[in-house]
Amino acid sequence: MKPFCFSIDKIIPSTEASLHPMDIGLIRGYGIFDFFRTSNYTPLFLSDYLDRFVRSAEKTHLYLPYSKEELAQIIHDLIQRNDLEFGGIRMVLTGGVSANHFSPTQGKLFIFCEDLDFPSPAKYESGVKLLAVEHIRAIADIKTTNYAFPVWHSAIWKKEGAEDVLYHLNGTISESSRSNIFVIKDNKIATPDKHILHGITRKRVLELAPATEVREISLEEVLDADEVFMTSTTKKILPITQIEGHKIGNGKPGPITENLLKEFLEMEKSIIQSVKKL
Amino acid sequence: MKPFCFSIDKIIPSTEASLHPMDIGLIRGYGIFDFFRTSNYTPLFLSDYLDRFVRSAEKTHLYLPYSKEELAQIIHDLIQRNDLEFGGIRMVLTGGVSANHFSPTQGKLFIFCEDLDFPSPAKYESGVKLLAVEHIRAIADIKTTNYAFPVWHSAIWKKEGAEDVLYHLNGTISESSRSNIFVIKDNKIATPDKHILHGITRKRVLELAPATEVREISLEEVLDADEVFMTSTTKKILPITQIEGHKIGNGKPGPITENLLKEFLEMEKSIIQSVKKL
């Protein structure tokens, strides 16, 4: 946690931020958030993240007291105050303290800056393992704070040496706990269409590989794929080489995944370059 | 919210309670709670609720800094301070402020006293309507604060004049959003066995009707039942007479449901009487 945060209506020391525990953000797990990162002081793909945050607030009937432009200004100020050259930024909007302790009311907005925790270079070189778990996220297309299941389950996946989980139900996959999933077979890329959060890194991959099929994908298809990778803000494009005890392809990161990661990193670099020139 | 609450390690004015917003209780919806009520200053079935709270903490790897006996003493003090003749008591244990913003660590304990909101007498006389919703609760047997889905969905059920929802998946029912479900056909009572929270009122009904079958129940069976009811701390035993547009039985509360409610209220009365005599 960096020294300064935005709390309700102003920038204050992060340690002084406080929420009433009867807020349904806590007692009902009813809140939304979003999370992005800065690279060279530039908040990457900020417009996409702010659009999603505004959409999440609308869909959950939560009042967001700032416009996209005002949020961008607050974030700009926070980056300055925290000297956030490379870091994460977390926006959270709570459900509020509700008379019946259930129905959404006017909540509170917080924005915190954080250190970033990227996967190690070794994970990009060897790929990672996922556990396959029967689960489906409710209202997965809204970025709620509802992560009770994966936080609870993470004790199991850590014990099994896995990076994360792959959710599937009735034979169809959806996503990982905080990442989207892509599969490649015979040079064709595909990614699930339902019960997923529309990731911003996923959106970038769809721009880099516009022929990607967005459709229902079976767990069987994943196990039979040549390459599998996951995308997220901090993971970028991370190869998956094992699911449970099963090897994906030859058990090594594949060329299409590696090429997409290269292209994604170049995209990131060119954004930072163009900002610098301004 | 009543004037006094227990916060971390002492009783303080409820308005002064505060939680850091970076607690994973908020940012990951990772926390547990329990909720019970007082009748004539007596916390009903307290031992069962405390057992469940202690179990929820264990299952979620959260450190609960007080024993069952110490919690009972704190609750006793709170009832006195708040003059809580009839009211609700909510215990919440958060996941804590975590270094990686995900893994559980040492959290904070809060206990609040509240006014109670019972269903109206008219609802017991006519029964209530539920919407049937395809959903299954993750780790339903642990009383987590994860209610993002029903809070979000409640806007729909209120519009449809429903009291709550009935969760079902692949044709099998589990529970309502905050209540257990019982069905009656040909004088036989049954209740689901899987993907449910083990309610304390459910436990009382199983004691009052020990022949109740605890087993898998299909949605079809519910629609075809003679009587259906739901149980919870505040609903006690509430008849369900409609699911979506479909009438249950003759569309009126049935005799077995009414008799169980009568017996439950007598049980409650006799507990209060026996406490008074002490």
Image (cartoon, coloured by chain):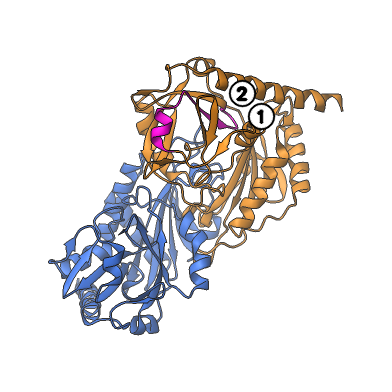
Chain colours: A orange, B blue
Residue B200 to residue A220: above or below: below
Comparing A187 with B86, the one in front is: A187
Instruction: Write down the chain letter for disc 1.
Output: A
Q: Position of residue A3 (x, y in %)?
A: 66, 34
Instruction: Please tell me whether mark 2 sits on a helix, a strand or a loop.
Output: helix
Q: Is residue A228 magenta?
A: yes
Q: Which residues are magenta?
A: A218-236
- What is the three-letter code of the residue carrying label 1? Leu
Q: Which residue is mark 2?
A: A260
Instruction: Please tell me whether mark 1 sits on a helix, a strand or a loop.
Output: helix
Task: Classify the position of the N terminus of chain A by image quarter.
Answer: top right
Comparing B57 with A234, the one in front is: A234
Q: Residue furthest left?
A: B211
- What is the three-letter code of the residue carrying label 2? Leu
Q: Which residue is mark 1?
A: A208
- Left or right: residue A53 versus residue A27 is right
Q: Position of residue A104 (x, y in %)?
A: 56, 62
Instruction: Write down the chain letter for disc 2.
Output: A
- The answer to whether residue B161 is seen in the rendering is yes
Mark 1 and 2 residues: CB-CB less than 8 Å, in contact? yes
Q: Residues within 10 Å of mark 1 (few under 14, many from 20)?
A: some
Residue B210 tag number: none
